[in-house]
Amino acid sequence: MAFFNKLFGGKGEESLDYIEVDIGRDTPKKSKVVLRPFVLRTFEDVGRILEILREGNTIALIDIKSLKSKDVIELKRSISKLKKTVDALEGNIAGFGENVIIVTPPFVDIFRGGSVPPQAPKTEQMM
């Protein structure tokens, strides 16, 4: 009401210099990161995996053993498509063992070796 009085020159009420607006009330909560397993059986499975990765909150563990035993060329094609999309999304992709690929969103780093993290000091061995 004070706003309209000030705007149209009404008198009688004190005018406000500002109006507080609580914008934090309607903001959605941050979603959690989901670790989701996939099995890559055909090249067509890549499309479904990429749809979920584009959401931006999924870490994908992809089992490639099935496709690897069927068709290595199709496997290479699938991995190439995954890699191109993950690079475009600025995520990370890495092999884990011989049959698993890990794909992460941009805010998750994959440890790739290099220097070994320090270990806790050894305690006295029991005899």
Image: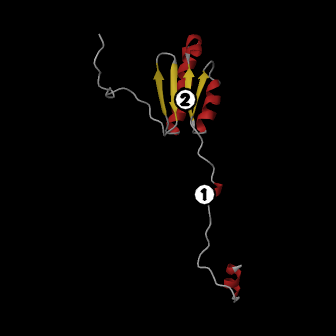
Quadrant hosting residue 22: bottom right
x and y percent of residue 53 in the render?
A: 59, 34
Q: Can residue 60 be seen in the rendering of this structure?
A: yes
Q: Callout 2: 10 Å neighbours few (<14), some, many (20+)?
A: some
x and y percent of residue 113 in the render?
A: 36, 26
Q: Nearer the viewer, residue 18 or 107?
A: 18
Q: Callout 1: 10 Å neighbours few (<14), some, many (20+)?
A: few
Placement of the N terminus among the 4 image quadrants: bottom right
- The mark closer to the camera, 1 or 2, is 1
SS state under label 1 = helix
SS state under label 2 = helix
Quick check: 122 above or below 1?
above
x and y percent of residue 71 in the render?
A: 58, 13
Quick check: 123 above or below 48?
above
Q: CA distance from mark 1 to mark 2?
A: 37 Å
- Give the residue at x 52% y 20%: 100
The mark total stands at: 2
Quadrant hosting residue 78: top right
x and y percent of residue 59 in the render?
A: 55, 31
Placement of the C terminus among the 4 image quadrants: top left
- Kindly identify which numbered label has been placed on residue 82: 2
- Type of amino acid under label 1: Gly
- Residue under numbered circle 1: 24
Quadrant hosting residue 58: top right
